[in-house]
Amino acid sequence: MKQVRTVERILAAYATVEGDGVRLHRAFGYYEVPQFDPFLMLDDFRAQRPEDYLAGFPSHPHRGIETVTYMLDGAIEHGDSMGNKGRIAAGDVQWMTAGSGVIHEEMPKPVNGKMGGFQLWVNLPGKQKMMKPRYQEIRHAKIPTVSPHTGVDIRVISGSVDGVAGPVKKIIADPIFLDILLGPDTTFTHSVPESHTGLAYVIDGEGTFDAGEGHRVGNRDLVLFSSGNSIWVRSFGKGMRFLFIAGRPTGEPIAWRGPIVMNTREELRQAFHEVKDGTFIKKAR
C-alpha cells in the first residue's frame, strides 16, 4: 500500500565558516544528529565572491565516514595521504569512503568566475568504520538524466529512476542521491524504501512537499520527511530544483569531533592520538 511521506521538519540553511575561512551555508550538522541518520551534515558552498572560498580546506584527517561532493560550478582540486590527486568540475561527483583514515585537502577553484556545490557526510556503521579507504569519482557525462514525464528531469547519481541506475554503487547506506528539476507547476512522486531516512534540499525555485499542509519552501530550505514509501512534490511559479537524498540508518551511537566520527569516545580519543603521533594512516590489509 502506498504511504506518502509527510514533512516532519523544515530547516533553513545557516551561514557558517569552515576550513581555512570558507564561507558556506549548512543545511544540517552536529546539532541535528541523529535525526538525519545515516547522514551527518550537508553543506552548501555556492558562492559569488572568490574571497569567500579560495582559502579552501587545507590538509585535514577523516575517519569513520564518507564524504560526497557534488559540483554545480567551478572545480575542486584535491590530494591525499595515499598519493591520490584529482580535480572535480561542474556536474562531477566524488564519493570518498574515508574508512580507517585519510588525510586530504580540498581547494576550490573558480571557472569563468563561478564556483559552487554541496558536500554531504554519511556515517559508516561500526563494522565498516575501519574499512580500506576508497574513491568513486564520477564525471558529468557518466551521470544519466531521466525524464519520467513532461516537466521532470532527474540526474541519477545513486539509486534508480524508471529502471535507470546511477553510477555510484556498492555504498553501505544503500543511498539514493538525485538532482531533480521540475518545470512550472509540475507534480512528481517517487518511491523510497520505507527503511530509509529521506530529505530534500531546495537549490532553486519554490514548491511544496506536503499536499495536505502545503508548506512552501525555496532556495536553501531543507525538508526532513516522515516515514513512508514514497514522496510527493509540486513546484510553483517558474519551477523548482532540489536534491533528494535517502539512506539506510545505522541506528548506532555517535562520537563526533571535527572531521572524525566514531561510535565511542575512546575510539575518538584513539583516532586523534594517532593523528598526533603519525600512525593515523593504516596500511592496506
Image: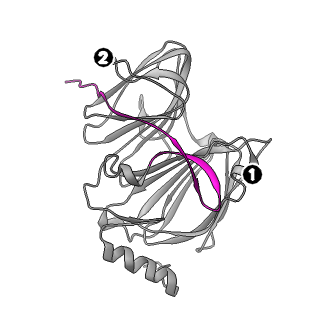
Q: Nearer the viewer, residue 128 or 49?
A: 49
Q: Residues within 10 Å of mark 2 (few under 14, many from 20)?
A: few
Instruction: Indicate which label's residue lies in the foreground, 1 or 2.
Output: 1
Q: Position of residue 138 (x, y in %)?
A: 58, 49
The residue under the point 70% across, 44% down is 115
Q: Secondary structure at mark 1?
A: helix
In this rendering, would 27 be left or right of 90? left
Q: Position of residue 162 (x, y in %)?
A: 42, 28
Q: Which residues are magenta?
A: 1-28
- In contact (CB < 8 Å): disc 1 and disc 2: no
Q: Residues within 10 Å of mark 1 (few under 14, many from 20)?
A: few
The residue under the point 39% across, 22% down is 215
Residue pointed to by mark 1? 51
Q: Quadrant of the N terminus?
A: top left
Of the residues shown, which amino acid type is indicated by label 2?
Answer: Gly
Residue pointed to by mark 2? 212
The residue under the point 74% across, 51% down is 51
Q: Secondary structure at mark 2?
A: loop
